[in-house]
Image (cartoon, rainbow, N blue to C red):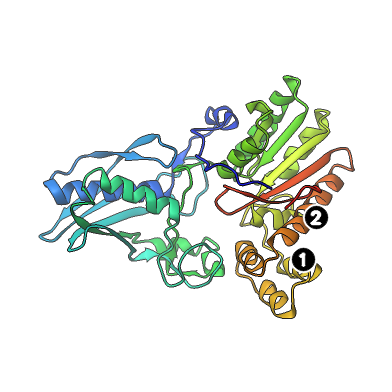
Amino acid sequence: MSELPELREPDLPRTMRVRKRALRTGWTTGTCGAAAAKAASIALTSGRTPADVDTPLPTGDRVTLPVESYEIRADRAIAVVVKDAGDDPDATDGAHLTATVSWRDRTGIELDGGIGVGVVTKPGLGLEVGGPAINPVPRAQITQAVAEVVDLAERGVRVVISVPEGERMARKTTNARLGILGGISILGTTGVVRPFSTESWRSSVVQAISVMAAQGERTLVLSTGGRTENAAMRLRPDLPEVCFVEVGDFTGAALRRAVDEGLREVLFVGMAGKLTKLAAGVLMTHYTRSKIDRGLLAGITREVGGDAGLVEATAGANTARHAYELWEAAGLLGPAGRVLCRRVKGVLEAFTDGVITASVVMVDPDGRAAVASSEAAAP
């Protein structure tokens, strides 16, 4: 399957515009960290302490966030932005994202995690083992925010992101099970917290499918988030926007409504984690309600000819992404991904008693390339 063009997160998909009236969105730890880093950079360079800061989002949009407090010392400046997760029951709601910015001898930016930001101890997260749990998109967002204040080609700064209550907050997450120890992760792909886990989100997914059916469209395209929806739109440019629904964790509810509306064709686009849960028959895929079935991953590895060592490694994989990386390194990503997609296809069709014909596509962890499909044309 061909490489997709580099994807940009949509401003807000059509389905999100429907939900926004019912739900109050919030801001990710990445956005709050970026705002704190920009505020501290302003204080370091000018001594000013603005009450709020205009902050870039990964989508290209911007948001103005209030700054809780500042501290200016001889060699550094510190700023705090409090996270507001909106209507999502987020474990990190109210977190004090604290940025400490100081000069350094080399140009550019050095980004590190402080107290309350977890340390990565296992592979499979797309982050360096031993480094801070600050994901790539927030890293870029923080760098952009600081660069709006400091010319990083001429000067260098060190930015440390801390969350004083982060270790306590992390106990309410699955971080420890994933090998992120000592605090929370700095996350976010769009910069916006969308309340996937609420009942209101489920209702809006159902509503979006009804709207699509009412417009006479017959092909429903489900995705789990912004990156996978972007990929789906690139895969099916022939379909109008209304056909694309970000399902979040509510695949089962979406399929039930699709059947009720008389739909017969569904394309599901996802990444390894959600697909693994679906392949195991789990239709509610929220991280607090279901876990990755490592036995399923090991079985797929065995089915596509993986040796005993690879089967054992997959059985002990830290995450589905870790299994994905193991398959990729062994040259088995295409076959294994195809089996995984076909199992998901079977689950989706069985859930609807065969009323719906499903096709499934797996994209890479960045959402930029389709790497496997349930259909014969898969790579």
Kindly tell me whether residue 82 is visible in this rendering: no
| Residue beneath the point at 21% across and 50% down | 41
Q: Which residue is mark 1?
A: 300
Residues at badges 1 and 2 in contact (C-beta under 8 Å)? yes
376 or 108: which is nearer to us? 376
Residue with the most extreme left position = 74
Residue with the most extreme bottom position = 309
Residue with the most extreme right position = 354
Q: Which residue is mark 2?
A: 343
Q: Position of residue 302 (x, y in %)?
A: 78, 71
Mark 1 crowdedness (10 Å alpha carbons): few <14, some 14-19, many ≥20: many
Q: Label 1 is placed on what type of residue?
A: Ile
76 or 239: which is nearer to us? 239
Q: Report whether 236 appears left or right of 70.
A: right
Q: Label 1 vs label 2: CA separation?
A: 10 Å
144 or 194: which is nearer to us? 144
Up-down relation of residue 32 to residue 308 (above or below): above
Q: Looking at the rendering, which quadrant does residue 343 occupy?
A: bottom right
